[in-house]
Amino acid sequence: MFVDMHHHLIYGLDDGAQTYEDMKAMLLGAYQNGAEEIVTTPHVTPGREPFDGERYLSHFRAARQLCQDENLSLILHTGCEILYTDDTVRLLESGDIPTMADTGYVLVEFLPGDSYDRLKRAARALGNVGYQPIFAHVERYACLRKGSHLEELHEDYQVVMQVNASTFVKAGFFERRWLDRLVNRGFVDLVSSDAHNVDTRCFRMRECYDFLKKEYGEEMAQELCHDRAKRILAEQ
Ligand SMILES: [Fe+2]
């Protein structure tokens, strides 16, 4: 069973599910693939595009109702994926955007070409006001491939590092070698689906779990796909 901290299933908010039917298909797909808990994380861009919190909560409640109606023992949480901007801390502090399942954790993404300095400033700014950053799909940021940048963020700033399940499944030789180094040195904390639909960007946690189990053993697969996320959610 999997605890997914990154999933765009709430419809009508971003480039994930567009309709109620899309949402239903994503929920059923994730459940059949082994999802136990999901933090729903629509994209939010503080200060650039308004986030419609009421619409989010209303569609989130519809998703919970759907789980009940379909008898899915699947727990859903509120959250969001924040494209980090200078307005992020202010909007978090004012309660206008949700943290991960009402914990102090926030899922943050950056533009692929953002500098290491920008990522470090974000980690520091969030940490200074008591938030614990989870960096979304760390495999996307070129600056983290250099030197000991990823290690520094992980060790000195306690950034939680999330990798997409599909990245492990699809990785070519060089990508796999980089990921292998990260996993072996303990720098990957969470594997999440980042699912956007049921075909091109679907929930591939089972496939990824099987891969991780084969490469690193069951304990590691369980830690990355379930246990670490469960410990974060226990901080609610
Ligand atoms: Fe995402």
Image (cartoon, grey):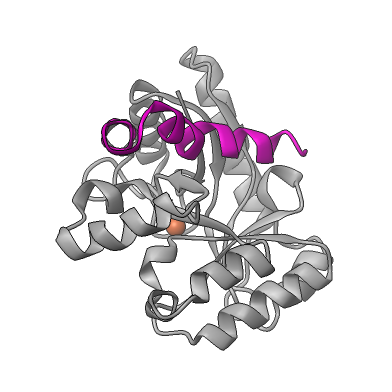
Determine the residue positioned at 57% across, 78% down: 119
Residue 184, compared with residue 133, is above or below; it is above
Q: Quadrant of ligand 1?
A: bottom left
Q: Quadrant of the N terminus?
A: top left
* Residue 47 seen in the current view: no
Q: Answer left or right for 113 relative to 229.
A: left
- The one of 117 and 13 positioned closer to us in this rendering: 117
Q: Answer left or right for 24 relative to 174.
A: right
- Residue at the extreme top: 71
* Residue 156 seen in the current view: yes
Find the magenta span and give its range.
209-236
Q: Percent position (x, y) of residue 59?
A: 57, 42
Determine the residue positioned at 59% across, 63% down: 154
Magenta span dominant secondary structure = helix
- The one of 221 and 225 positioned closer to us in this rendering: 221
Q: Percent position (x, y) of residue 129?
A: 84, 69
Is-magenta flag for residue 185? no
Residue 88 falls in which quadrant of the image?
A: bottom right
Residue 196, compared with residue 204, is above or below; it is below
Q: Percent position (x, y) of residue 192?
A: 44, 45
Is-magenta flag for residue 231? yes
Determine the residue positioned at 76% across, 53% down: 104
Residue 101, compared with residue 149, is above or below; it is above
Q: Quadrant of the C terminus?
A: top right
